[in-house]
Amino acid sequence: EGDHVRGGDGGGGGEDEDGEMPAEEQCARVLRAVRLLLKSTAEKLNKQHKTHKRCNYIQREAIRNFRRIGREMKDFARRNPAVVGERPEWNSLYEMLLFHIDEEMAREIPSTKMKMTSESCMGTRANNVGSYDMLSDQMHNYLYEMGCGSSCQNHMVDIILMEAMRRSKGEKVFIIVLDCCSVGNCAAIDYCMRFMVDVLKWFDVAGVLYFDNLHGKGPADGRFGQHERLHRLLNTLSLDHYAWRLEQVRSKRQGLSDTATVIQPHSFSLWNRYFNSHTTSLGRPWRDGNVPFPTWYQLRDHNRHVVFAVRGVSDWPDSGQGSSAPMLELKALLLEFEQPNGWTASKRLFTDPSSELKLFCFLPRVPRADYQKEPEPIFADLSKLHASKGQVAREAAVSLEIAQERAKEQGPDAAGPAAAVA
C-alpha cells in the first residue's frame, strides 16, 4: 500500500510503475461513488416519504369525513326513534359501522415483575388484533395464542366477520380501515367484502380504506400504547388475565370500557381455500363463466387504497322516511362504486382526480357445482383426531388376531412370521 502511495506522488494521480491506480485515488473514487449513492438514496427516500405523507393525509381526510357522516347518521336516528323501530332487522338502518382494525405487537405471557427462575416463567407469545369503533371510541380486542399460527388473511377474514356479527344492529354500511400489508391488502379481504354484500346480504356497502404502503397510524395504535404500558408495569399470568387487563381501559370520549375475546385455535377457518373454490375453475379460468382468484400482485399493480363492494345504493330514498342529509351525502360518495353482483370496485385515492376506477370480478356468472359448502377449519378437531387414532389401533389389533389365527392353522412353521408381526 505504501508503494502505491509513493508511486502516486510522482505520477500526478495517475497509474504507478506497475500500471495500478494509487491507493489515494482509489479511495477518492470510492468515496465519490458512495456520496452519489447516498445522495440518490436520500432523494428516493425523500420522494417516497412525501408520497406516503400525502397519501395518508388524503386517507385521513376521507376517514374523518366518513366518521363525521357516521356520527351525524347516528344522531339523526337517535332523534327519530320511530324511523329505527324497536327491533331493526339486518341491513335495514341507514347508518354506518366504521372500524380501524390493526394487529398489536405480540406480548409474552406470563409476564412477571418479580425475579423468578427461567423454568417457572416459560410461556408463549400472544397476539392481539384490535378493532377500534371510530364512532363510539370503544375498542374490542381479539386475543389468540401463537398456537394459532402466524397472522394471515384467514385470521383477518374471521375477525372481520366476527366483528360484523358482534357490532351490527341493522346498519347498511360497513367500512374498515387497514394497514396496506399482505395480511390485509389481498384478494381474500376483497372477496370478504363482496361475500358480506352478495352472499350473506348483511350490508348494502362493505369497504376498506388502506393507509399507504409504509403503513399509517390510527386510533387503534393509541390503544396499543396503553396496552404496552399495562404489560410492562403489571403482572400478566395468563391470556385470560391479559384480556381482563385490557378491559380496564376506558375511552375518554364516552367513558366506555374496552372489551376482549379469547379465540380458540379451532375457531379459525381456511377462507382463502373456500373463496378459491367459488372463483377459480380447476385450472380453466374465464371458462364457463368462472373467474380466476386475483393475486396480491394483480391487486397491488395499480396501488389501490380504496376498495368497495356496493349494491342497491342507487335505490336509497332521496326523501321521506329514513332519508337525511348525511345519508344523501354518503350516497353521493358511494354511487360510483356500485357494481353488479360479484364485482368489486377500487381506486387509488378518494379525492385524487387521476385515480381510475378498477374492477375485479370475484363471483362467477355460472355458479360452480364443486364449490365448498363451508370453509374448512385450520386445525382438525381433536376429538375426531383421537377417534381416528383409536380406530386405527383397533383395526391393527384385529389384523394381528387374524394373523395369529392363520398362523396356528398353518402349523408351527408359520408361527415365526406371525410372532414377528406381533
Image (cartoon, rainbow, N blue to C red):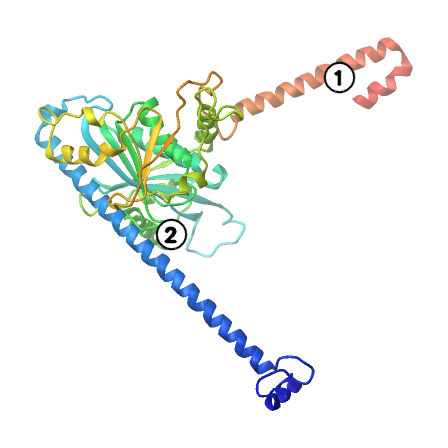
- Residue 269 can be seen, yes or no: no
Question: Dividing the image into 4 quarters, which one contains the C terminus?
Answer: top right
Q: For mark 1, what is the residue?
A: 400
Q: Is residue 24 left or right of residue 143?
A: right
Residue 362, picture quadrant: top left
Residue 60 image position (x, y, % from top left): 25, 48
Residue 144, picture quadrant: top left
Residue 209 image position (x, y, % from top left): 30, 41
Where is 359 relative to 87, above or below?
Answer: below
Q: Do residues under tags 2 and 1 come within 8 Å of each other at their CB atoms?
A: no
Residue at point 37%, 41% (across, down): 129
Check disc 2 and report its element: helix, strand or loop. loop
Residue at point 49%, 46% (across, down): 123
Question: Dividing the image into 4 quarters, which one contains the N terminus?
Answer: bottom right
- Camera-nearest residue between 290 and 65: 290
Q: Is residue 396 left or right of residue 33?
A: right
Give the mark, 2 or 1, whose residue is nearer the N terminus.
Answer: 2
Q: Is residue 59 left or right of residue 122?
A: left
Where is 301 relative to 26, above or below?
Answer: above
Q: Residues within 10 Å of mark 1 (few under 14, many from 20)?
A: some
Give the residue type that dot 1 points to: Leu
Residue at point 8%, 28% (across, down): 80
Check disc 1 and report its element: helix, strand or loop. helix
Q: For mark 2, what is the residue?
A: 214
Residue 353 image position (x, y, % from top left): 25, 45
Give the residue type that dot 2 points to: Leu
- Give the label, 2 or 1, closer to the camera: 2
Counting labels gives 2
